[in-house]
Amino acid sequence: MVGKLPKVWEIFFALTDQAWFAPIFRSVRRVYNYLNARPLVRFIRNGNYDVIFTTHFLSTEVVGWMRRKGMTDARFITMVTDYDVHRIWLVEGVDQYLVASDYTKGRLKGLGVEEGRIAVTGIPVAEKFIQPRDKRETRRKLGLQEDRFTVLLSTSSFGFGPIEELTALLSDIQMIVICGYNKGLFERMTVRGNPLHKICTFVDNMEEMLAASDVMITKPGGLSITEALANHLPLIFFSAIPGQEAGNVRVLAANGIGMSDKTPPEIAAAIRAFADSPEALQKARDAATALARPDSVAGIVKEILK
């Protein structure tokens, strides 16, 4: 639906976020989850856990149902993994919500969650994303020119979006281009042979790609944003999925972070403006730094151990 009928998805997403529709949708969800999540229910019942920590609304709904049925008395914590909050995350039985930002906390409070049950920890990222790395050294390791302004262009693992148009418009800019599992795109980009463009398929060293870059062009998924913020990268968004990704864009815009709804020529112009103005680049980096929470894992562990 997201890929083929995005407008239908947008309507569905908005409809399911309405208070009057929530009881109907919740009933359907519970039947669906019961049919699909019975192995999870057995796993939790057999585990006799002290704490259950969820990071997805489906598992949150399942554990909430188990709490209400007396199937588990574990302390129940859920991590909202986007910067905005859909009503689907609201589940009776959650002891503590952990969220990405003060905006996210305010949104949950507006949906009726008591302030004492919400903690702003930030979304967790792997430790490798917050380890200090020298930019010049990392570029050298990746085969890039050490002193050249560098852009990271990374879409989803499917490698869709205006990648080819953007790289053509920025042919004189050093870029790391992640094609994901899109083999056709990777082959076409490789044939062009631009020495300033490092073309990659799916990678497992994204932490190095981020550390080597000055700006990131990406889709506004919650984890991608968090990893970029941990590296203080200015963000330019494209092809936001209506719903959760559009919500992420709104939250970041409220914090002075990111550009969105731009055409490829406008994105290219914004990149050149950053390349030509160290002051503008630093201002954007400062905004990213202000929202970043590199200590999120420590904060989450603290909440779990309370």
Image: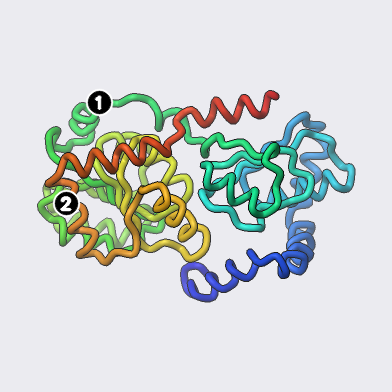
Residue 20, given in percent of the width and then of the height, sits at 72, 69
Q: Residue at x 52, y 37 (%)?
A: 122
Q: What is the CA distance from the residue labelled 2 to the residue labelled 1?
A: 24 Å
Q: Is residue 92 left or right of 1 when viewed as pictured?
A: right
Is the image coloured rainbow, by chain, by secondary structure, or in one colour? rainbow
The residue closer to the viewer here, 254 or 185, is 254
| Residue corresponding to mark 2 | 273
Q: Residues within 10 Å of mark 1 (few under 14, many from 20)?
A: few
Amino acid type at image mark 2: Ala
Height in image: 96 above or below 86?
above
Q: Quadrant of residue 70?
A: top right
Q: Between label 2 and label 1, give the one nearer the viewer.
A: 2
Q: Secondary structure at mark 1?
A: loop
| Residue corresponding to mark 1 | 134
Quadrant the C terminus occupies: top right
Count of numbered labels shown in the rendering: 2
Q: In the current view of this chain or complex, which residue is farthest to the right? A: 70
Q: Residue at x 52, y 47 (%)?
A: 103
Residue 236, given in percent of the width and then of the height, sits at 31, 53
Q: Is residue 156 left or right of 297 when viewed as pictured?
A: left
- The numbered dot on residue 150 is none
Say whether residue 269 is visible.
yes
